[in-house]
């Protein structure tokens, strides 16, 4: 697999309402037939009318992406598993498609390691553009949720809501090491929204959780 084929692996997640698809976030096709991973908060733990969105002419991320082309297909998916400790969600579709990505772990990363992010940063505003960003690891951290501690990394970049669920690759490889969860929100957020964005998330400390937990959910 090369990065040029990611247009057939990384997809937007949406919800169909009155024959209109509202985009929510990003999902990655796994190496198990019909299985995708995203962030659980993207789905709001509700599988009603949930779809993975496919453009008929998806071929290469190197192609120009026509923002005026609104032809899309929604593939119905259901929630197969949710991990409340990691905010990971496995989606399942009745299709035979699968990817050949390899799944690693944040154990492969160190402070300063370079990583590649692929996702749909403005999906929540209806923009369907697969976008690549490259950044560094600012920290490796353990986050405690109840009695469970999980491995996360801090990405030195600012994330948009549509990027939730994006795969994080160890740079220059095809190994996924983490799934983007979202920007750190001190105290759970500021309680206000400006243009759909919590001002407390406007910083370059985005969290991603180790992809190793996905293997445990399949």
Image (tube, rainbow, N blue to C red):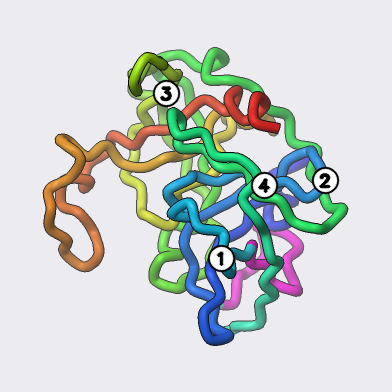
Q: CA distance from mark 4 to mark 3?
A: 20 Å
Residue 98: x, y in percent? 81, 46
How packed mark 1 is, by other alpha carbons closer than 10 Å (few <14, some 14-19, many 20 or more), is: some
In the rendered structure, the answer to whether residue 119 lies left or right of residue 139 reads: right
Residue 63 included in the magenta stretch of the image: yes
1 or 2: mark nearer the eye: 1
Q: Give the residue at mark 2.
A: 33
Q: Give the residue at mark 1.
A: 48
Question: Relative to the observer, which residue lies in front, 120 or 28?
Answer: 28
Q: CA distance from mark 1 to mark 4?
A: 16 Å
Q: Is any part of residue 161 visible from this angle?
A: yes
Going 64% across and 30% down the picture, which residue do you hit?
217
Residue 94: x, y in percent? 80, 58
Query: Are the residues at dot 3 and dot 1 in contact (C-beta closer than 8 Å)?
Result: no
Question: Relative to the observer, which residue lies in front, 55 or 52?
Answer: 52
Q: CA distance from mark 1 to mark 2?
A: 21 Å
Query: Are the residues at dot 1 and dot 2 in contact (C-beta closer than 8 Å)?
Result: no
Q: CA distance from mark 3 to mark 1?
A: 30 Å
Magenta stretch, main secondary structure, is: loop
How packed mark 4 is, by other alpha carbons closer than 10 Å (few <14, some 14-19, many 20 or more), is: many
* Residue farthest to the right, as pictured: 96
Q: Magenta residues, as a range?
A: 52-66
Q: Is any part of residue 173 visible from this angle?
A: no
Q: Secondary structure at mark 3?
A: strand
């Amino acid at each position: 697999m090369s990065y040029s084929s990611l247009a057939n692996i990384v997809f937007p997640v949406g919800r169909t309402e009155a024959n209109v698809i509202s985009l929510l976030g990003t999902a990655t096709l796994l190496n198990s037939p019909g299985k995708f991973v995203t962030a659980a908060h993207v789905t709001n733990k509700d599988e009603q009318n949930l779809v993975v969105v496919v453009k008929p002419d998806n071929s290469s991320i190197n192609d120009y992406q026509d923002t005026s082309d609104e032809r899309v297909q929604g593939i119905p998916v259901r929630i197969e598993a949710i991990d409340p400790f990691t905010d990971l969600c496995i989606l399942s579709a009745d299709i035979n498609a699968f990817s050949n990505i390899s799944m690693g772990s944040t154990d492969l990363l160190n402070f300063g390691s370079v990583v590649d992010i692929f996702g749909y940063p403005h999906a929540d505003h209806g923009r369907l553009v697969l976008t690549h960003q490259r950044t560094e690891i600012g920290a490796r951290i353990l986050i405690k949720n109840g009695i469970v501690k999980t491995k996360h990394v801090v990405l030195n970049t600012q994330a948009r809501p549509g990027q939730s669920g994006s795969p994080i690759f160890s740079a220059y490889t095809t190994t996924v090491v983490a799934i983007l969860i979202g920007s750190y929100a001190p105290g759970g957020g500021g309680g206000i929204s400006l243009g759909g964005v919590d001002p407390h998330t406007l910083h370059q400390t985005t969290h991603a959780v180790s992809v190793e937990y996905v293997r445990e959910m399949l």
